[in-house]
Image (tube, helix red, strand yellow):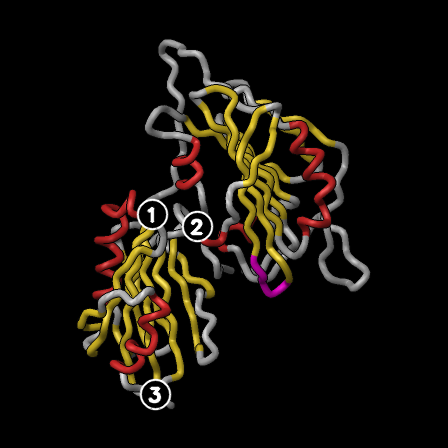
Amino acid sequence: MKKSIFFLVPALIAFIMIGCGGGPGYTEVKELDTHVDEVKKFSVQYPSNWHIGAKQTGRFSVFTTKEGMNRFRAYDPEGLPAVRIEVTTADSDSLRTIDTIMDKSLRFEKQVYSDPIDVTVDGVSGKKLEYAFELEDGPFHGEIIFAQKDPGTVTIFSIEAFGGAFEHYKTTFDEILKTLVLAETPAPVSDTIYNTEELPFPDEELVKKAGKGYSIMIPKNFRSRKGLGKDGNLIKSVMYDGERRGDCYINVDILDASKQNKLDKIVDDNLAKYGNPAKKSTKLGGENAYVLSYNATGTVKRRVYFAVKGDKLFRITMDWFKGEADKYLPIFEKSIASFTFE
């Protein structure tokens, strides 16, 4: 989510070409087929031999293979060189503008994305954001475009590719983008109801997850994966998050503190890295701890907890989206309160 980034899962290899080195290669591109949304009126072409992941009013997605879909659930650091092409729509009005829709559509922290780039889609001016980061099997690259043909509907077109696949398919992506016809606001129809599918908020039921020297209770519908920690003295980093948002998570880093285990000095030495927020005394797993609170971005709040146990420093980062704080913060606070050293 973020100028530094995360995520994880292995996948089976099926319906793909095998490269010269014997490893998984890229799925070929056969003739293009066309998807038309009869309600929202958008259309787009896609490789007819690729796997359709979603096909419903206001949303269409296609993946290189069915197996490749799994990698996007957790953004695994290695696996198939999977690609996702997706078109979605969002209603807009005077309060819900293309800029606010752009901000809320981001899967990762805002720092990961480029500044908006002016583009033309279907003869209409739009904005494009680019984002990329290195994973174990090579570069991950994504692009997301926002454009609207009329004031009531924004079309969101995105491409994400693992393992260097973006460059491999770039010519195809350019060709597909040229076929995109933007959505229109449906005319009112009496007695017609359109259902919008929303990904779930964190479950109020918590389940225990055991880590390296600790345990924590997290929402039942959250998963654990490789965390954000990149420090040189990092021992282990684990992230806990759900599918709804990429900027709402709990990340636990365990660092070697054998050379320096004085909590006050550790925190003081790192304050500048966090923008010099005020440090407050607290408890973590029954041990003395400090917490820093500040704005990670314009829309995301952050708390970072520090505690020393033996020769290890435990650093817990808790991020939540301000617009949905009532759904995330109380549950996240229960998770932090449940943290126990094992």
**Residue appearing at x 34%, y 88% in the figure:** 260
Give the Cα distance between marks 3 and 1.
35 Å
**Residue appearing at x 28%, y 86% in the figure:** 262
CB contact under 8 Å: marks 1 and 2:
yes
| Along the viewing direction, whichever of 62 and 171 lies nearer the viewer | 171
Q: Which mark is residue 163?
A: none
Left or right: 5, with 288 as reference point: right
- The residue at which mark 1 appears reads as 299
Q: Earlier in the sequence, mark 3 or mark 1?
A: 3
Residue 83 visible? The answer is: yes
- The residue at which mark 3 appears reads as 260
The segment highlighted magenta reads 133-137
Residue type at tag 3:
Gln
Residue 54 visible? The answer is: no
Q: Is 136 contained in the magenta span?
A: yes
**Residue appearing at x 42%, y 21% in the figure:** 152
Residue 174's place in the image compared with 265, above or below, is: above
Q: Position of residue 96 (x, y in %)?
A: 36, 30
Which quarter of the rendered picture does the N terminus lie within? Answer: bottom left
Where disc 3 sits, the SS reads loop
| Along the viewing direction, whichever of 292 and 278 lies nearer the viewer | 278
Q: Earlier in the sequence, mark 2 or mark 3?
A: 2
Q: Residue furthest bottom?
A: 259
Density class for disc 1 (Cα within 10 Å; few <14, some 14-19, many ≥20) is: some
Where disc 1 sits, the SS reads loop
Q: Position of residue 118 (x, y in %)?
A: 56, 36
CB contact under 8 Å: marks 2 and 3:
no
Majority secondary structure in the magenta region? strand
Give the Cα distance between marks 2 and 3.
33 Å
